[in-house]
Image (cartoon, helix red, strand yellow):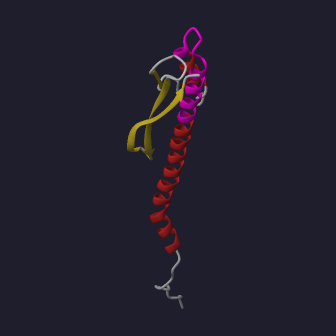
Amino acid sequence: MSKRPNVRSERGQTMVEFALVAPLLLVIVFAVIQFGVLYNNYVTITDAARTGARKGAVSRLAASPTGAAVAAARASAPGLDQAKLTVNVTATSWEHGGDLTVTTRYPYTINLLGWVVRSGSLTSATTERVE
């Protein structure tokens, strides 16, 4: 006598549920990683703008205070692609008490499993008084 198969058996249900949910979980994990990289890049360009502004503010007597500010900003962001990093320095006056602004810009792309969700550029600006 053969045993009748149990039609109500739930064997395999877990595998089917996992197969349905796994892609969503992977997208969420990769999104968290992408946003972590994006946040790290933002913190880096913010620090680069601050470092460049500080260097430019104390280098008014240097041969090229703008060049010193740009070099300091770029040196403060070694983990970024220097070809894509844009550093702009503007000063109302290089005399004592003038304002110096360093603006950094870096492009980003949020890519989830081959789909570009968003792209643009991260921007940070810091203004300091020339000493």
Q: Is residue 109 part of the magenta span, yes or no? A: no
Whether residue 80 is visible here, answered yes or no, is no
Whole-percent x and y of residue 75? 60, 23
Q: Nearer the viewer, residue 92 or 21?
A: 92
Q: Is residue 58 depicted above or below 128 in this figure?
A: above
Q: Nearer the viewer, residue 124 or 61?
A: 61
Q: Nearer the viewer, residue 55 or 12?
A: 55
Q: Quadrant of the N terminus?
A: bottom right
Q: Is residue 54 part of the magenta span, yes or no? A: yes
* Residue for point 53% across, 43% down: 39
Whole-percent x and y of residue 65? 55, 15
Whole-percent x and y of residue 12? 51, 73
The boundaries of the magenta stretch are 45-67
Q: Quadrant of the C terminus?
A: top right
Is the stretch drawn in magenta largely helix, strand or loop?
helix
Q: Nearer the viewer, residue 87 or 115?
A: 87
Most extreme residue toward the top is 63
Most extreme residue toward the bottom is 1
Whole-percent x and y of residue 67? 54, 15
